[in-house]
Amino acid sequence: MENRLRLLYGLQRVDSSLDELHELKGDLPHLVEVLEKKLREREQQRKTLEETVKSSIVRRDQIDLEIVTTKEKIEKYKEQQFQIKTNKQYDALTREIDLSQERITALEKEMESVEGKTTVAKSDLEGLLPELEELKKELKERQTELDQVNKEHEDEELKLKHQRDKLTVRIEKSDLKQYERIRKALGGKAVVPVRRNACGGCFKRVPPQVSVELRKNSSVMTCEHCGRMLVSDDIVQATTSDE
């Protein structure tokens, strides 16, 4: 049991050191993550706008061609009206001319809508491009800062992660699960020593009976106030001397 406690406290010391290294980076990791997400969103927006402009231009050309073709049909129908011999044929051509005129009107209305959509998309794209460049510039600067901080502490961080890996494989799964749960819930500190009969996490007084049992190092005990795992000075000293 004493070895279980030493392993848990050792893991806490390693994790606390890793937390300190993370704090040295400040908001840089989060800021880089936010900038990367924002840049992806803006790039997708740019892509959508470019596709809108492209498809609108294609549709505009299709409409323009159909209008020209339809007008040519109207002229052809009008010429045919002079050549027919019956009223029925004349009326049929007149209906075709009217339908073609209606089609042209609908196409011209669609053309107006497409042109408007193209204008808006081009305007939005024009305003977006400078923002994209500014985002790329800021992300590059922040990433460079983060890389520099990471490089300064790279060896130490790798060493600590290696120590953590060696400890976690030796800790019982149930202990590790409890440790991770408490650590996540209580700001990183899951295992704390008892100093002057007070919990090293919440600093509230530990009952005398708990202090007595704690010195036996025979079980994993938790603070009745905050729920953190408690260890005795013997465990602290033994763990520290091993490092």
Image: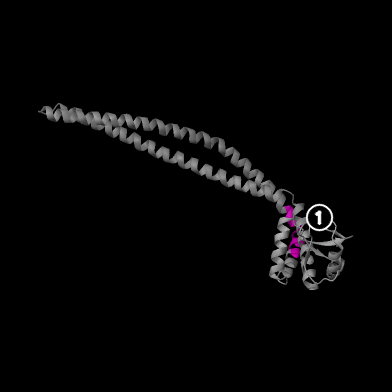
The percent position of residue 31, horizontal first and vertical second, equals 68, 47
Residue count near mark 1 (Cα–Cα under 10 Å), binned few <14, some 14–19, many ≥20: some
Q: Label 1 is placed on what type of residue?
A: Cys
Front-most of residues 229 and 146: 229
Point 54% across, 35% down: residue = 126
Quarter of image, res 227:
bottom right
The residue wearing badge 1 is 202
The percent position of residue 38, horizontal first and vertical second, equals 60, 45
Front-most of residues 111 and 99: 99
Relative to 116, is 21 on the left or the right?
A: right
Image quarter where the C terminus lies is: bottom right
Relative to 119, is 87 on the left or the right?
A: left
Question: The magenta stretch spans which residues?
Answer: 148-160
Is the image coloured rainbow, by chain, by secondary structure, or in one colour? one colour
Q: Is residue 36 visible?
A: yes
Image quarter where the N terminus lies is: bottom right
The question of residue 111 being in magenta is answered with no
The question of residue 155 being in magenta is answered with yes
Main SS class of the magenta portion in the image: helix
